[in-house]
Image (spheres, helix red, strand yellow):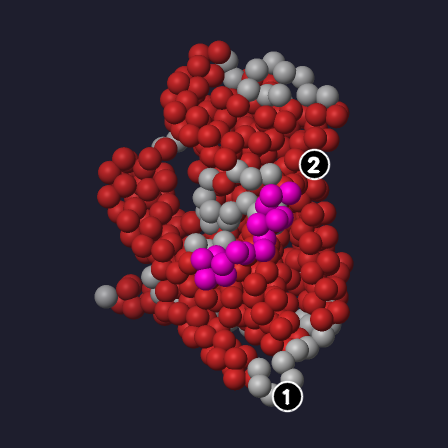
Amino acid sequence: MKLIGAFMRTRLHTKILVGLLAGIPVGLLLGPRAAAIEPLGQLFIRLITMIVVPLVFSSLFVGTASLGDIRKLGRVGVKTILYYLCTTAIAITIGLILGNIFKPGDNINESTRQSLLSSYQADAEARIELADQKPGVIETLTRIVPRNPIESLAEAHMLQIIFFALLFGIAVTLVPGQRGKPVIDFFDAVSEAMIQMVHIVMKFAPFGVLALIAAVVGKFGIDILLSLLKYTLIVLAGLLLHMTFIYSSAVRIFSGLSARKFFRGIQPAQLIAFSTSSSNATLPVTIECVEENLGVSEEISSFVLPLGATINMDGTALYQGVAAIFIAQVYGISLTLGDQFTIVLMATLASIGAAGVPGIGVITLAMVLQTIGVPLEGIALILGVDRIIDMCRTVVNITGDASAAVVVASSEGDLRKDRSPGEEKDLA
C-alpha cells in the first residue's frame, strides 16, 4: 500500500514513464495474450481523443476572436506554415542522406525478403488501396473549406475545423459593440472545461500506456525487429538527430529557450505520443505543456498546434525518406538525384492534410513510392516494425509542433520567459 501511495504522489510524466517501462516486460511475458489488456489502452486513446475537437475549436476561436488584429493572424499563419514546410524538407533530406550512406537494404537476403513479403502482403495491399483513395494536394486544399461545419466537427476533419474556427473568430471581432462578447465568454468557458477534462483523463494515462506498450511488444516480439535491425536503427538515429539538433537549435536561436527546458517541458506530451502513435490524441496534452511549461500564449498555441497536428509530419517524412531508399535497395533499383528530389517534394506535399493517426505514414509512403516507380508491394517489407517506428516518429512530430509554437510565439512577443526550468506544471 505504501508503494501504491508513493506512486500516486509522483509527477505525471514519471507515472507515465513507469507505465511505459512496465509494459515491455508485461508484453514479453504475456506474448500474444497481451492483446487481452489492449482495450484498456484503446479506452485511454478514446477518452483523450474525445476532448480534441471541442478543445481545438473553442481555444482556436477564442484566440482568434481575442486577437483583434487580423494582420497579426496572417503573420502567425505564414510563419507557422513556412516553419513546418522547412523542417519537413530538412527531415526528409536527413532520411535520404542516412539511407544513401548506410544502405539499409543491402543486407536483406532473398529468403528474408520473401518471408516478409508473404507475411505482410495482405496488410500492404490494404494500405495501398487506402493510398489510392487519398485525395491529391489540390483537392485536399479545396476541402479545407467545409460544406457543413457541423459535419466537420462530428467527423473530426481538423483542417476544416481550423478554417471554420478562424473565420468564425474573425467574424465575431467584426461584430459592432460588445454584442460578440457573450459568444467569446461561452467558448472561453468551454475551453477551460476541456482543459480540466484533460487533467481528469490524464490520471488514467499510466495504465493506458502500460496496456498499449504491452500489446505492441506482445504482438511483434523482437524477432521481426532483429531481421530489420539496420533499417530500424537508421530510422531511429535520423529521428533522434532531427529532434535533438534541428528543433533544439531552432528553439535556442529564435527564442533563447534552452534545449533542456524545452524538452523537459514537453516530456509528458512526448510520452503520450510514444504510447498512442497519434498526434491528434496527444494534442490536448501538447497544448497544456506548451502553455503551462514553456510560456506560449493561448492565442498562439491554439493556432499553431492544431495546424501542426494536421500538416506537420517531420518524423513521418524522415521515415519515408529512409523507407523509400530501403525498399529501392532491396529491389536493386538505383534512385537518381532527381528521384530523391521528387521524394523530398512529394513527401512534403503528402504531409499536408495527413491525419494525425497511427499508421498514416505507410499510406503516404505508398504515394511517394508510386511517384518514383518503386514497387508498392515493397511496403510489406517494413510493416513488421512500422508500429514501433510509428511510436517514435510521432514523438518527433509533436516535438516539431511544440518547437514551432515556441518559435512563432517568441517572434510575436507572446512567449513568457519568467518560468525557471524547475517550474513545469504537473498535468495530473
Spatial CA distance of label 1 from label 2 is 47 Å
Question: Can you say which quadrant of the picture contains the N terminus?
Answer: bottom left
Q: State the residue in front, 272 or 362.
A: 362
Q: Amino acid at mark 2?
A: Leu
- Residue 118 percent location from the top left of the image: 39, 18
Closer mark to the observer between disc 1 and disc 2: 1
Image side of residue 161 versus residue 81, left or right: left
Image side of residue 90 versus residue 330, left or right: right
Q: Is residue 337 above or below residue 352?
A: above
Say whether disc 1 or disc 2 marks the residue closer to the N-terminus: 1
The kind of secondary structure element at disc 1 is loop
Q: Amino acid at mark 1?
A: Gly
Return the residue at label 2: 345
The kind of secondary structure element at disc 2 is helix
Please give the range of residues in magenta: 138-152
The image quadrant that residue 322 belongs to is top right
Question: Can you say which quadrant of the picture contains the C terminus?
Answer: bottom left
The residue depicted at 33 percent of the width and 42 percent of the height is: 215
Q: Is residue 222 above or below residue 264?
A: above
- Residue 84 percent location from the top left of the image: 67, 51
Few, some or many C-alpha atoms within 10 Å of disc 2 (few <14, some 14-19, many ≥20)? some
Return the residue at label 1: 177
Q: State the residue in front, 308 or 207.
A: 308
The image quadrant that residue 163 belongs to is bottom right
**Magenta residues, dominant SS class:** helix
**Are circles 1 and 2 on residues that touch, CB within 8 Å?**
no
